[in-house]
Image (cartoon, rainbow, N blue to C red):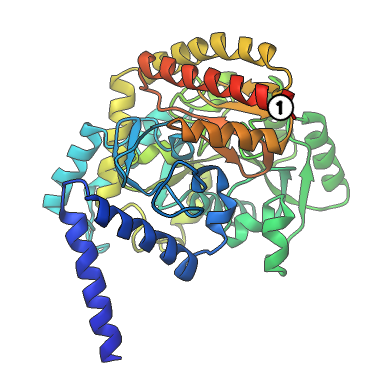
Amino acid sequence: MEKQKASALEYSNKWLEIIKNNENPDVNQADWMIRESVNNFKNHFNAWWLDYRKSVTLADYCWLIPGECVAVEWKWKWAVFQDILWREYLDWLGWYWMMSHWWSNPDVVAAVQAQLLHTPMPSQELIDPLRWVLARIIAEITPWDLKYSFFAWSWTEANEWAIKLAKMYTKKSWFIVAVKWFHGKTMWSLSLIWKKDYREPVWQLYGWPVYHVPFGDAAAVEKQLEICETVWVWIAAVMMEPVQWEAGAIVPPDDFWPRIRAATKKHWVLLIADEVQTWLWRTGKFWWVDHWNVVPDIMTMAKALWGWVMPISAFVSTEEIWQCMMSPNPFIHTTTTGGWALACSAAIAAINVAIRDDYAWMAESKWKYLMDRLNPLVEKYPEIYESITWKGLLIGQHFKSADIWYRVTSELFKNGLLIAWTLNSSVTSRIEPPIIITYEQLDKWLSILEKVLEKVSKDIKNI
């Protein structure tokens, strides 16, 4: 045991020296850091992860570890990251919608740094101000009478607790959700999830009935609600994503949300909107439901909420529904670290910056600029593209096959541009740039994409 402690101390000291050093590592140190990263991934985290992410882990232009080269990220600024070998990449992944503000937004960082000098974590016994400041701000920006919030760390926690709130308020346990949906991988969220790859290995999930309907099919939701009421199956809530992003950027018909809102009210069922990935003007409106003036009973949010500095998520509901969280037991739902001071300061700054700098106009003007140039590429390369779907700066590229998806994605990465897949579609890659990305960077991305599409097209024709 003493030997293990000595080894852990020595190893941690070495990495702390690296972390505290603001200079780029030299070649020998970079070599060591890459090898350590690969070995640690394989031996202590997930050995298959590197194989699964072949588009960014196998790089024939890397001379350090043939066949095992990974781009080990090290420094980020705005929409560009630098790996340990000092190579730069333009980020079009947006870290799965979280990076609306770009990396290290100075206003968000400054707020967190200032709060750190006060306190990073509240006592939980006294009334700390920032959680309640953030709750008020969220009440002011959410639709209509949504006014009470609770804070967690991650997307799936917010959805987990929204499910809990719906069950507590309605005293019912059944849910209607969409085929191909994705709301997280904790146990309640997993119990409602669609993809068996995530459900089956866990085996026994939480055991209430869940009814899956096709996404975007309002008639299917209406029919399922009618059937459940007829046979005395009492539904607590209908829970939907505004856009099925992990399913491949599936945008519903315009009548979908108004109709399911009307149907849930008719049958005295709650409507939960998972706005985790779609809010803060990402789709051109502050919330996706704002496109149709739909007000859900419960909403969840995360991702852009924390300005990509300190993680935080939230679920919000009405005063009437929230009563079950307050009385008779105000401690019915608590958290030790959710809504900690540093995260709340980041969220307050992130919302402030988005409103101040008019992200609504930025998102709308930039997605129109992008689509004017992307649509002609779809027509020019029918052997590559199936289609492109979008709602604002949530854009999905649908390719003819998984092989073509891999060819395009890996070539983009080799040319210094990072995009990624969607969890439930092997032929779709996501485009989700920061809302404040510059037009020069948009042009650079489009130039790289055209170069890659031309190469992949020639390769396909030569097969």
Q: Position of residue 159 (x, y in %)?
A: 54, 49
Rendered position, 284 above or below 56? above
Looking at the picture, how far across and down is residue 15, in whole percent? Answer: 24, 63
User: Residue reaching furthest left?
Assistant: 117
Please identify the quarter of the rendering in which residue 138 is found. Answer: top left
Q: Up-down: is 245 above or below 355?
A: below
Residue 98, quarter of the rendered image: top left
Q: Is residue 392 above or below residue 415?
A: above
Q: Nearer the viewer, residue 115 or 431?
A: 431
Q: Residue placed at 16% from the left, 45% from the top?
A: 113
- The residue that appears at 50% across and 43% down in the rendered structure is 60
Determine the secondary structure under disc 1: helix
Q: What is the x, y in percent for residue 13? A: 19, 69
Give the residue pinned by disc 1: 460
Q: Residue reaching furthest bottom?
A: 1
* Left or right side of 201 for 339: left
Q: Nearer the viewer, residue 313 or 271?
A: 313
